[in-house]
Amino acid sequence: MRNRQVCLTEGPILRSLVALAVPIMASSFLNTVYSITDMAWIGMLGSKAVAGVGVGGMYVWLSQGLSSLARMGAQVNVAQSFGRGRKDEAKEYARAALKLTLVFGALFALISVVFTEGLVSLFHLGDEETVRYAEEYMRLTCGMVIFSYMTVVLTGIYTAQGDSKTPLLANFIGLIINIIMDPLLILGIGPFPRMEVIGAAVATVSAQFIVMMVMIAGVWKGPGNENILAGIRLFSPSERRYYKGVFRIGLPTAIQGTVYCGISMILTRMVAVFGPGAVAVQRVGGQVEAVSWNTADGFAAALNAFAAQNYGAGQMERVRKGYRISFWTIAVWGGLITLAFVLFPEQISRIFFHEAEVIGISVDYLIIVGLSEAFMCVELMTVGALSGLGKTKLCSMISILLTGFRVPLAILLSMTPLALNGIWWAMASSSMVKGVLFVVAFNRETARERVL
């Protein structure tokens, strides 16, 4: 099998970025389809089931802060070590990150399973059936979160080496499994029992396990076992400096992700005042937004590895050119998503909802939030570039400050005649400001590097 790794420090920039980014974007798109497939089938159970899964899924999202610590810490350090030609050092960073992942996954699973009822009660859902759905979904998906954790970190390590094709293959296989299992287990087709929300959780966890196994198997594919994970002794002692390196880069990203999720939980509690239908719209709206969010995040991952390797190799002008190419690519994509949300909100909403009142709420959500899609895409892409330069603290400061502003703004606007739409406007406006500010920050930081 030919080498799947893309050389990021030499050759045409556009070709290098596209070769790495397209498989990552395809993987992100598959993850989007993966999530939308769940929501579409769960939607057939009613808005209460969607709301319950949405709340249970919030804790899965909250847990991603821990996995992002290991992923970002591994991806940036591994890529920069590659750029310096130090593959032994890259291997040590990868090993430290994987060991941290196992610990984080076990701790979060234990806490989630033991305190499920209390954690779900924080949302004050006010409906017994919705609460039951949330608890059922949370126990299984959070209890088996280690599969998701390992997949996230392995993807980061693969990407840092310039290999985005193996994660794409793994995610494609996982998508197929999820698509097949969802209707069988949720609705009880043929000999399968009707498991409803539990069936959705089983399908999701099973698919994540398969994705993880495919990525582990991919370590030994290719000529000469060029993957740094080949032959790694996972449980051998690692020097403290490698753990410190992972934490130094990854901790700000983890804090940012955790705070972002916490803010979203607060907003969800505010949305819950307007009923289960409003919560369901927020949950599904987030999944539909993943069409732009996951694609931008995928391109950001490619740009992160590109920037980190070239920064390690001392090629800052190549980093700046790569950013400019990425900016226009992702801005156009975000603009197209905005047009789709604004022009076809009802058609999109009817895919997931069947109650007229909920469809109306969804239409408003898509139009308002849709206006910010291009800005959000640029924000995510720029965060990837800045993180590749090791500027994760700066990214976290900007993101936490402006995302946190959503809460008081949402409170203020929801007290006006806008009501629920005021919360949607708070989310959209903060994304617009963040998109602009991150571009300014990137230009300032790279100008400073040029002077140095």
Image: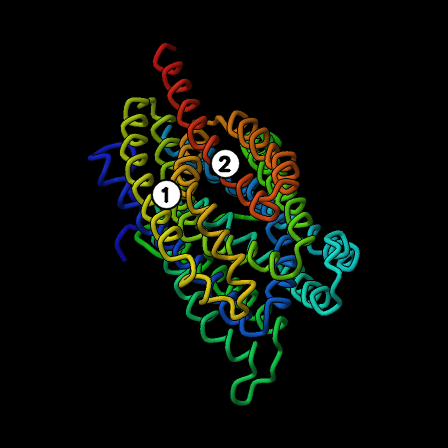
Which residue is most to the bottom? 191
Q: What SS does tag 1 mark?
A: helix
- Residue 12 image position (x, y, % from top left): 20, 35
Crowding near the residue tagged with mark 2, few <14, some 14–19, many ≥20 C-alpha atoms within 10 Å = some
Question: Does dot 2 land on a helix, a strand or a loop?
Answer: helix
Q: Amino acid at mark 1?
A: Phe
Sooner in the amino-acid sequence: mark 1 or mark 2: 1
Residue at image coords 50%, 51%: 365
Q: Which residue is mark 2?
A: 429
Residue 53 pos. (x, y %):
62, 63
> In the rendered structure, are the residues bearing label 1 and label 2 in contact, judged by CB atoms less than 8 Å apart?
no
Identify the residue under disc 1.
Answer: 299
C-alpha distance separating marks 1 and 2:
23 Å
**Camera-side mark, 1 or 2:** 2
In the image, 174 versus 200, the foreground residue is 200
Q: Nearer the viewer, residue 301 or 182?
A: 182
Where, quadrant-wise, is the C terminus in this rendering?
A: top left
